[in-house]
Structures are given as structure tokens and as C-alpha cells.
Image (cartoon, rainbow, N blue to C red):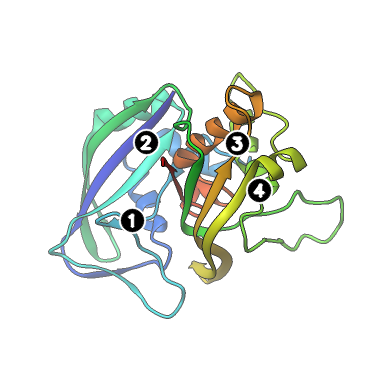
Amino acid sequence: MIYTLTFRLKPSNDVIIPPFSSKLSRTLFLSFSPTYSKIIESKEPNKPLRITVVKDQGKPLYSNGKSKVVLKAENTYTFIVNTLLEDVVKEVIRVESVNREIYNTSFHVELVNVSVKENVMAEDARFYRVHFKTPTLLQPPRPRMKRKENRYVLFPYVPLLFYSIASHWNRYMDKKIVGVTGSKTLYYFREVNYRIRPMTAYYGNIPNKGFVGWVVFELSARKGSKIRENIRRLLDYVNYFGVGKSRNIGFGEVEVKSLNG
């Protein structure tokens, strides 16, 4: 099961926060879950918990280096935590709300909603709109070489997209998904329209260049086929855990919607 925890936060005064605002939401969440502190210490990729950036009426807040991220005292903001860990949910429910002082500001944070997802499967449709809401750091599989420089692509190339989503799925789900990273998927799930642009976001002083925007894909695999069902599972799963490097801290946040008609 996938748990979605929605939090509301309000600052006591206007405050400048880090350029990639999940630094704030992650710090605040530590007050709710001791388990989370152990998760962030782990060097393992594909963590069972994702924290989004802070949002203003649903709009993700982060800077591309040209402006500062400012929270206003008169506004209320949100962030979301998705997790596979029931223990984390129990910890949060016990705490419910906290007051935490950071950046010379007092933040009141409270849990406002908990939802549970059991059946992970996107609605069956011909077309899907995949919206990359925060910079997506999509990597090819790393070759065996000494050079450690990261390599990101600036378009959601289908085999790499599903390679990234399936790697997270297969780490935690009993029913493994294979066969979605090759040429068959490339032909059965093809882009028909898009508006993608490169975007650099700063985490601390480190620039991370990925892409944001949307792509409309057409799914033409036969209804009831294994590949169609696997694609639909992963299209739903990505709504909760994102895609690409650093998805657990808010990069690569994705929203998938079916387009019927």
C-alpha cells in the first residue's frame, strides 16, 4: 500500500527559505518521524519515502538561481509525503502537529489528510499527459567506468523513463515488472505532443540541470496485454514516487492524467 500524507504549514513572518524548498519540508518532517532520520542516512537509492517541495496553492516552490523563494506570513503552504512504510504513518498520526523554529521563523505544521492507495493502475486510455512538475534528473544506466560525473538527459526518452520508474517499483513490490525498457515499449508508447524545456534548480549551492514541462503519449499496446498493464501500473506509481535521481527529495515530481476522447 502507498500512503499519502498531506501537511499544511504557516510561517510566523515573511521568510527566505532554501532555493529548493524541500530542504524546509524535509527538516520539518523530521519532527514527525524518527524513522525518517534513519532513511536519509542510508546510501541506498530508491528510498521508500518521497517528500515534495513546499507548494503554494499546489504550485511547487523552487528557484532557478534568478530569484529567492519567499514564504509570506499571511499565506498557508503545503507539502506531501508519500511512503510505503506503515510505521512512518503511525509516527506522524501520533504527533499530528508541531511548532518548529528554523531560519529565525516559527513554523506551525500540521497533518491535514492521510490517504491510502491499494490498487496501483492508471485508468485505461489511449492518451496520457505526463507533467514533469519539478526538474527531472533522468539518468541512463551508469556504465562500468571510473569517471563519476553524472549524465542527465533533457527529454523523457521512453526506455529511460520506464527504467527509472521500474527500478523503484521492483525494489519494493512483490510482482516485478520487466520488459518495459526496450524497443517494444518505445513503439507502443510514443510521444504525440510535448512542451519540454531544460531547467536548472539549486539544491544548496549545487546546480542541477534537468527538464520540466509535459508530454502527451499515445499507448497503442493491445488491451489486456502484459505490456499495456505494466505501463499503466508504472504510470500510476510515478504519481507517488516520481522519477529520476533525487526523486525522494522532490526532484522529478510527476503527475499523470489520462486523456479520454
Residue with the mark numbered 4 = 158
Name the kind of residue labelled 2 in the image. Ser
The residue furthest bottom is 66
Left or right of residue 149: residue 259: left
Residue with the mark numbered 3 = 168
Residue with the mark numbered 2 = 33
Q: Secondary structure at mark 2?
A: loop
Considering only order in the chain, which callout, 3 or 1, is on the residue closer to the N terminus?
A: 1
Name the kind of residue labelled 1 in the image. Val
Name the kind of residue labelled 3 in the image. His
Which mark is in front, 2 or 1? Answer: 1
Left or right of residue 178: residue 248: left
**Which numbered dot is residue 54?**
1
Disc 3 packing (10 Å; few <14; some 14–19; many ≥20) = many
Q: Which residue: 63% across, 33% down?
A: 221
206 w.r.t. 128: above or below: below
Q: Secondary structure at mark 1?
A: loop
Residue 85 falls in which quadrant of the image?
A: top left
Residues at marks 2 and 1 touching, judged by CB atoms closer than 8 Å: no
Residue 37 pos. (x, y %): 46, 40
255 w.r.t. 240: above or below: below
Residues at marks 2 and 3 touching, judged by CB atoms closer than 8 Å: no
Residue 23 falls in which quadrant of the image?
A: bottom left
238 w.r.t. 152: above or below: above
Disc 2 packing (10 Å; few <14; some 14–19; many ≥20) = some
Considering only order in the chain, which callout, 3 or 2, is on the residue closer to the N terminus?
A: 2
Cα distance, mark 2 to mark 3? 22 Å
On the rendered image, what quadrant is the C terminus found in? top left
Residue 27 seen: yes
